[in-house]
Amino acid sequence: MGVVYHGHYAEFYEIGRTEALRSLGITYKEVEAAGVIMPVIEIHTRFLRPARYDDLLTVTTNLKDLPTHHKIIFYSEIFNEAGELLNAGTVSLYFMEKKTMKRCVMPEMMKEKLKEFF
């Protein structure tokens, strides 16, 4: 069909989350080393326009709220080279203790890096 497969958008969201955190000096590896994992628990997406093969895409990823409990929600938008919004969505993740698989709050090191933006 000449368009990007819909399943790839979840991967684009993951790249956006990972790079957004990395830009703040946080890596998933460090979060997991602190004993916390962040499984995805929910994804919502809106397909507004198709991304086409060979399009250069820009993914923006933001947090609207500083998490105060066990859940974090990332907001993403995907644009083409012309600046047209192609896709928008949210990804919700839980903070969970790696050993017990029980929900927990955001790791303190992550909270310290994020709180200056709120």
Image (cartoon, rainbow, N blue to C red):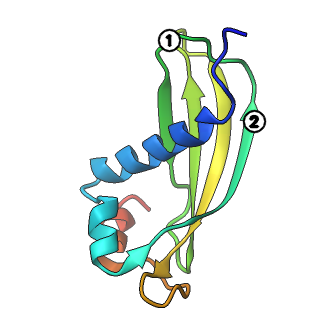
Quarter of image, res 34 = bottom left
In this rendered view, identify the residue nearer to me: 77 or 96.
96
Q: Amino acid at mark 1?
A: Glu
The quarter in which the C terminus is drawn is bottom left
* Label annotation for residue 81: 1
| Residues at circles 2 and 1 in contact by the CB criterion of under 8 Å | no
Counting from the top left corner in percent of width and height, residue 37 is at 44, 72
**Is the residue 3 above or below the residue 20 in the image?**
above
Q: Is residue 54 above or below residue 18?
A: above
Q: Is residue 36 visible?
A: yes
Disc on the earlier residue, 2 or 1: 2
Query: Is 97 displayed left or right of 43 in the figure?
Result: left
Residue bearing mark 2: 46
Q: Which residue: 37% across, 72% down? A: 111
Q: What secondary structure is found at the residue carrying circle 2?
A: strand
Q: Quadrant of the N terminus?
A: top right
Tell me where residue 115 sits by quadrant.
bottom left
Q: Is residue 48 above or below residue 111?
A: above
Q: CA distance from mark 2 to mark 1?
A: 19 Å
Viewer-nearest residue: 13 or 4: 4
Percent x, y for residue 19? Answer: 36, 44
Going by the numbered disc 2, the residue's amino acid type is: Arg
Q: Describe the element under mark 1 as helix, strand or loop.
A: loop
Q: Residue at x 48, y 91 (%)?
A: 100
Q: Residue at x 49, y 43 (%)?
A: 61
